[in-house]
Image (cartoon, grey):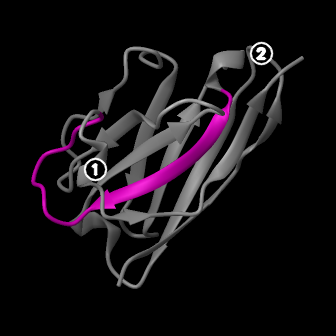
Amino acid sequence: HLQLVESGGGLVQPGGSLRLSCAASGSTLGYYVVAWIRQAPGKEREGVSCIGSSNSIPYYADSVKGRFTISRDNVKNILYLQMNSLKPEDTAVYYCAADSLSNYCSVSEINAYDYWGQGTQVTVSS
């Protein structure tokens, strides 16, 4: 049974950077399509980025393209999200999620992800 634990959130000024980590246990993260999904207060969940199980081409929401980078270390069983040039509108709880059934990744089909971490808060404010 896959378990996911996020870390790395915090308070950062606009223009700053953070790297989120998602440590997996109970199974091999490399078998799964994985994603970062965020939810801002009062808003619906938004897919930020995803990558397939074979480290195929990652996908990004338009709102984060060119600023965020998803990566995975299949040896350490960790998923990362490098966030640069952060904006106040990036403030949200960030979740890592895994899809055990699909063979492609999607940032729009959020309900396909069946394993979720507890989330880590990212606040971008001066």
Screen quadrant of the N terminus: bottom left
**Residue 30 image point, x, y percent:** 27, 65
Query: Callout 1, which amino acid?
Result: Asn
Q: Nearer the viewer, residue 44 or 116?
A: 44
Residue position for label 1: 111
Q: Is residue 114 above or below residue 84?
A: below
Screen quadrant of the C terminus: top right
Q: Residue at x 38, y 35 (%)?
A: 49
In magenta segment, residue 125: no
Q: Residue at x 52, y 51 (%)?
A: 95
Q: Residues within 10 Å of mark 2 (few under 14, many from 20)?
A: some
Query: Is residue 104 among the parts visible in the rendering?
Result: yes
Q: Residue lying furthest front in this view?
A: 42
Disc ID at residue 62:
none
Residue position for label 2: 14
Q: Is residue 3 left or right of residue 121?
A: left
**Residue 73 image point, x, y percent:** 41, 59
**Residue 63 image point, x, y percent:** 46, 15
**Closer to the camera: disc 1 or disc 2?**
1
Secondary structure at badge 1 equals helix
Q: Residue lying furthest left in this view?
A: 103
Say whether marks 1 and 2 touch (CB < 8 Å). Answer: no
**Residue 92 image point, x, y percent:** 64, 35
Query: Callout 2, which amino acid?
Result: Pro
Q: Is residue 109 left or right of residue 39?
A: left
Q: Residue at x 23, y 53 (%)?
A: 112
Pointer 1 or 2: first along the chain? 2
Secondary structure at badge 2 equals loop
Look at the image and give the residue range highlighted in magenta. Answer: 91-107
Q: Quadrant of residue 74?
A: bottom left
